[in-house]
Amino acid sequence: MNIVSSNPVAAHAIGPRLFALSLGAFAIGLSEFVIMGLLPQVASALHVSLAEGSRFISYYALGVVVGAPLFSLSTARLCRKHQLMCFITLFLLGNVSSMLASNAHGLMISRFLSGLPHGAFLGVAALTAASMVAEHRRGQAVGKVMLGLTLASLLGNPAATVLGEHLNWRWAFACVSILSLVTALLIFKLFPAQQQEERSSPLKELKGLVNVRIWLTLGIAAIGFGGMFAVISYITPILTLSAHLSAFWLPFVLFAFGLGMVLGNLAGGKLADRRIMLSIFCILTWSVMVLSIFPLMVSSVTGIMFGAFLIGTNLALGTPLQVRLMQVAGKAQTLAATLNHSAFNIANALGATLGAYVVQQGHPMTQTASVGAILPVMGMVIFIFALLKEVADRKQTSVSSTDLL
C-alpha cells in the first residue's frame, strides 16, 4: 500500500504545526462562506442585485475547481513548506484585493483569485499533517487540520457576519487577510524546508492518475457528498416555508449544522484510523438514513435543529476519503489530495442543482433531503466498485483480502 511518506518530527513540534495548518484551513473556510451571510450588504454597496451578487460565491467555487489541479502540478517540484507558503500568500493577496475592490467586477476577479489556492492548500496541508505522525494516527492528524474548516462554519462565519453588519463588509475580508498573514508567518517559522523530502514532478503526478482507484475515490466524494448540500443550500426556505418558523431561528439552525460538522469531522478522523473502507461505507449508509428521516423532523424548532445537526455530521466522510486517497495515489499524492477538494465543490454544485430541480417541480422543500439521499446511494454503488477493485488487486499480489474492511 503506497501512502504518503513520513518525516521524523519531534513530538513537541507536531502540535504547533498542526495548529498553523488548521489556522490556514480556518481562514479558507471563513473566506469561502462569509460572503453568504454578507451578500445583501455587499450587493447593495457595489450596486448590484442579489442574483448578480451570487457570482461572488460561484466565482470562488470556480477558482477552487480550476486551481486545485493547476497549482498542484505547477508547484510539484517544490517542497511542501514552499508549496504551502505559495498557496497561502496568493490566498492572502486575493483577500486583500477583495477587501479593496471598488466594483462588482473587481470583487468577482478577486474572489476567483482567492479560490485558486483553496484546494491546493488544504490538500498539501493534509499530506503534511499525515507525514508528521505514525500511520495509525494519520486520520486524526488530517481531521485536526480540517477542523479549521468546520470551526469557520460554526464560529468564524457568524462572528465575521456580525462584524461586517455593524462596521463594514470589508472588515470581514480584513480579518481573513490577517489570519492568512499569521498562517504564513507560522508556516515560515515552524516548518523546515526538508531537503531529504521526496520531490515529485508534473509528469509523475499526471502518470499517477491512470490509477482507477483514485478516480473511484474521487467519484465517491463528488457524488456521495452531494446529499448534504441538497438540504443545506435550501435551509432558509425549509425553515420558513416548510416548517413555518420565523427567520429568527436561522442562526440557531446553522449553528446546529456547524456543530454537527465539527463532531462529524472529529469522528471521521478516528474512524479513518481504524478500518478505512468500512468507515466510508458506514458513513454513506448513515448519510442515507439521515437524509431520509430529515423531512419528518421539521415540524418544530427542536426537530429542525436536531435534523440540521444530523445533516452536518455527514462531513465525517471527508477525512476517510482524504486518507484513502493517500493510500492509493502512489506518485500522484499532491494532485490526488487537491482534487479531493475539487470533488467536494462538485458535490456542492450537484447537491444544490438536484435540490433546485425538486423545488422547480413544485415538491415540498423537505423533499430536497429525500431526493438528495439518492446521491449517497450512488456513492455506495461507486464504493462497491472500489471494493471489488481492491479485492482484485490484493488477489493479484497474493495478499489475503479477508480483513479488507
Image: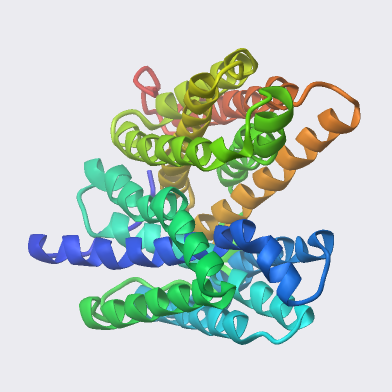
Q: Residue at x 63, y 57 (%)?
A: 36
Give left or right: position of 111 versus 44: left
* Residue 201, position as x, y percentages in the image: 51, 74
**Image position of 38 with respect to 183: above or below:** above
Q: Residue at x 43, y 55 (%)?
A: 152
Between 404 and 46, the one nearer to me in the picture: 46
Note whether residue 65 is visible. no
* Residue 377, position as x, y percentages in the image: 65, 22
**Image position of 128 with respect to 360: above or below:** below
Give left or right: position of 400 versus 100: left
* Residue 149, position as x, y percentages in the image: 43, 54
Image quarter (top left, top right, bottom left or bottom right) of the N terminus: top left
**Image position of 303 with respect to 26: above or below:** above
Q: Choose top left, top right, bottom left or bottom right for residue 187.
A: bottom left
Between 123 and 251, the one nearer to me in the picture: 251
Q: Residue at x 57, y 78 (%)?
A: 74
